[in-house]
Amino acid sequence: MRRQKVYSEIFPITTPVEKVMARAPRGIILTGRSSDGALASREAVSRCAKELLASGMPLLVIGSELDWLMEELNKEGTPGLLHSLPGGLESLAEPGGGQVLEKFVLSICRCQPTWTMESFIEASIQEIKAEVGKQPVVCGLSGGVDSSVAAALVHRAIGDQLKSIFVDHGFMRKYEAEQVIDTFQKRFGKSFIAVDAKERFFALVKGVTDPEEKRKRIGEEFIRVFEEEAAKLGEIRYLVQGTVYPDVVESGAGQGALVKSHHNVGGLPEKMDFQLLEPLRWLFKDEVREVARQLGLPDELIWRQPFPGPGLAVRIVGEVTPAKVAILQEADYILRQEIARAGLERDIWQYFAVLTDTRTVGVRNQQRTYGYMVGIRAVNSIDGMTASWVHLPYDVLERVSSRIMEEIPEISRVVYDISSKPPATIEWE
């Protein structure tokens, strides 16, 4: 529907009808299945559908699992408000499926195709100005696409009232910190604050080998740095957060925790009392990237892959040192270069290198070496809950392996991770 430039929202089937109707919808689409293949109780679904139809609301039922509902409603002599598409949601991508949806949305529900990212940006700017007024706003800027787009949008609305704080903990990918700083210093000027905290983070993880301990220490220190920098700015009421619509859907469906003021955005400490600004909370990821393009953010930022908060520290098995980070940065950079050279960077959900704590025997310049083993990981996923390993072309793997071992003397072996999630996880630590 959104690709047809029509705004839509998602509700779980258990949502009271009056709450749905309070949103003043033009029409309702009923579809879906639970993880065990069974819908919510038929009684609840049937009651919901009948109440919607009784209100005069056009209803489109999608999926063969709801055939019983269509039969039940048709027996009761439902008026011409009821429509169906027997195939599941995947059928919308098949010939004719899209036309059924288009007819329902534009002709039957009489929706106007006005949902564009240009109109979204214009409306958001006005809403942000009205909400904030002249008060200062802070954003914990990680450099990821969501927080970056949220910061750029708010800055477009209120300018230097927004202070964005970027903390470089030393565990970013090669050139990544410099790229974030360069991009946002040019865009935000003095309202962008970059904090070089590499030394304190490396000191914090020295000698630590347990992955959970590494994560906890880095997360806590990140909070402390952000807290110190935010305190220098005086009393701050508003915090910009890069919440996107999948977060809202998950929370509304009871599948995850509600977003609270202590949600970790750029290291937000729990004791800080902020009012959240979440300008992207109604957007899906593809829409966020379109907003980024409209705002003029660079492609390198728009298409940045998911990246763990502790960064490369949890892609180094064992103790983290500046030397190990430098080795991994080079290996990961080579991998990203070759993936881009092959034209695959937008076909793979996530790809990265891992520096293991395994040493293996090798040969370099006709002499024995005893270097590190590096793992290469590439996976495709929709939601990150499950993932399948990518069948990278052999020639790409060969170039990656050859370059890593030729250009990085500390590495003597490269392996490719062919495990899916589950039972493996995407990250190694």
Image: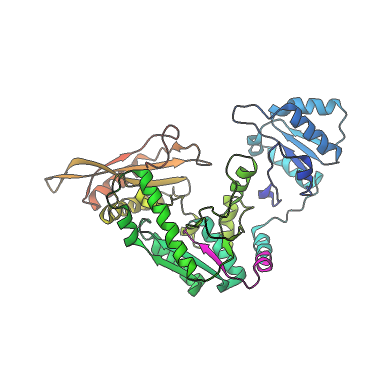
Q: Is residue 45 left or right of residue 140?
A: right
- What x and y, as percent, mark residue 64? 69, 28
**Residue drawn at (82%, 41%), measured in percent from left and top?**
57
Frontmost residue, 129 versus 296 = 129
- What x and y, as percent, mark residue 130? 69, 68
Q: Is residue 181 left or right of residue 98?
A: left
Q: Is residue 91 left or right of residue 324?
A: right
- What x and y, as percent, mark residue 129? 66, 68
**Residue drawn at (42%, 54%), measured in percent from left and top?**
220
**Furthest-left residue in this view:** 367
Q: Taking the image as drawn, is residue 317 in sight?
A: yes
- What x and y, as percent, mark residue 238? 59, 64
Frontmost residue, 61 versus 311 = 311
Q: Taking the image as drawn, is residue 296 in sight?
A: no
Image mark count: 0
Which quadrant of the view contains residue 277? bottom right
Q: Quadrant of the C terminus?
A: top left
Question: Any magenta on residue 133?
Answer: yes
Question: Any magenta on residue 217?
Answer: no
Q: Is residue 89 above or below residue 113?
A: above
Q: Is residue 56 above or below residue 43?
A: below
- Give the colour scheme shown: rainbow
**Residue drawn at (71%, 30%), measured in percent from left and top?**
86
**Furthest-front residue in this view:** 271
Q: Which residues are magenta?
A: 126-143
